Amino acid sequence: MTFEDKMIVCTDCGQEFVHSAEDQARYAERGFTNEPKRCRACREKRKAQGGGRGQRESYEVVCAGCGVSTTVPFKPTEGRPVYCRDCYRSRQR
């Protein structure tokens, strides 16, 4: 399969950038089916900001199993127990 350089418009900054034949071959080799949407500078900027996901909230809770203070990545529901990692794993077995 032969590839040719392709001009693509970055979805973030609107500038054109080259998706080189070499990069296209690398994408195909790795099984990627979509072309890049962002230029290198915008990809680097997005990566530095955590991939565009923003900061993940965490909540301080007391484990219902052992009473230790821990943090969880979800908002606890009133009346439902929350466990630390060790207690959660031991309950799964």
Image (cartoon, rainbow, N blue to C red):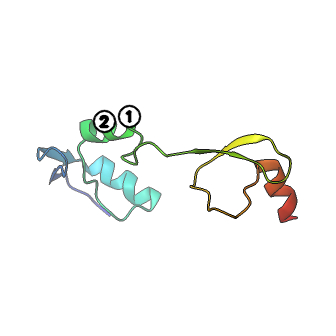
> Is residue 42 shown above or below 84?
above
**Residue that mark 1 sits on:** 48
Instruction: Tell me what residue is drawn at x 71 percent, y 42 percent.
Output: 70
Q: Position of residue 1 (x, y in %)?
A: 32, 64
- The one of 1 and 25 positioned closer to us in this rendering: 25
User: Looking at the picture, which amino acid does disc 1 mark?
Assistant: Ala
Instruction: Tell me what residue is drawn at x 33 percent, y 41 percent.
Output: 46
Q: Are marks 1 and 2 in contact (CB under 8 Å)?
A: yes
Instruction: Tell me what residue is drawn at x 49 percent, y 46 percent.
Output: 56
Spatial separation of the CA atoms under disc 1 and disc 2: 5 Å
Q: Residues within 10 Å of mark 1 (few under 14, many from 20)?
A: few
Q: Quadrant for the C terminus, please.
A: bottom right
Spot the residue most to the front: 79
Question: Which mark identifies residue 92?
Answer: none
SS under mark 1: helix
Instruction: Tell me what residue is drawn at x 40 percent, y 44 percent.
Output: 54
**Residue that mark 2 sits on:** 45
